[in-house]
Image (spheres, rainbow, N blue to C red):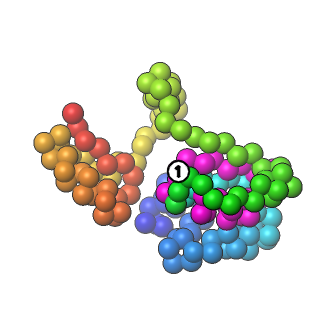
């Protein structure tokens, strides 16, 4: 997977499963400066690591809550670093249409892992559950 991410344009790739202290890794990789942007999918249990890893004036987009929706958050570090923290939630149908229009205009193509017919939706969900997918799993309707 790291090779595919680099092919897609990532500057650096890190596997949090092999090194769960990725906040320390990020600081080391940036000369203790911190990263510019974090896409936070973990939620309450990982948000403090994201805050620690983010540079002064950086940005965190909170798009997931895999570890839960509540917990102790070190808010003073958000203030001290001037971090912008945005919550991203599923939008409306109109917002989805706007997103698709932008994607089309800039020729952004989503990464598709696999496509399943509606009659085989069960296999699509099994693919997701396996955690081995890279990109979107599509069910054709």
Q: Position of residue 2 (x, y in %)?
A: 48, 67
Magenta stretch contains residue 9: no
Q: Is residue 41 left or right of residue 60?
A: left
Q: How many marks?
A: 1
Front-most of residues 9 and 17: 17
Which segment did they paint magenta? 44-66
Q: Relative to 84, say whether 81 is above or below.
A: below
For label 1, the residue is 64
Q: Could one spot residue 29 in this view of the protein? A: no
Note whether 117 is above or below 96 in the view shown: below
On the rendered structure, is 80 left or right of 101? Answer: right
**Looking at the image, is 43 positioned above or below residue 61?**
below
Q: Quadrant of the C terminus?
A: top left
As drawn, which residue projects farthest toward the left?
A: 119
Residue visible at 75% across and 60% down in the picture: 74
| Dot 1: element | loop
Q: Position of residue 5 (x, y in %)?
A: 49, 60
Instruction: State the image coordinates of residue 59 (x, y, percent, origin top left).
Output: 71, 49
């Amino acid at each position: 997977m790291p090779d595919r991410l680099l092919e897609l344009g990532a500057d650096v790739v890190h596997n949090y499963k092999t090194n769960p202290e990725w906040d320390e890794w990020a600081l080391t990789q940036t000369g203790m400066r911190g990263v510019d942007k974090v896409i936070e999918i973990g939620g309450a249990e990982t948000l403090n690591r994201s805050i620690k890893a983010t540079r002064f004036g950086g940005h965190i987009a909170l798009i997931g809550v895999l570890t839960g929706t509540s917990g102790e958050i070190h808010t003073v570090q958000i203030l001290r670093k001037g971090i912008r923290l945005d919550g991203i939630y599923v939008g409306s149908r109109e917002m989805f249409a706007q997103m698709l229009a932008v994607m089309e205009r800039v020729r952004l193509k989503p990464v598709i892992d696999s496509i399943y017919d509606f009659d085989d939706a069960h296999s699509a969900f099994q693919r997701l559950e396996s955690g081995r997918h890279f990109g979107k799993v599509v069910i054709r309707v």
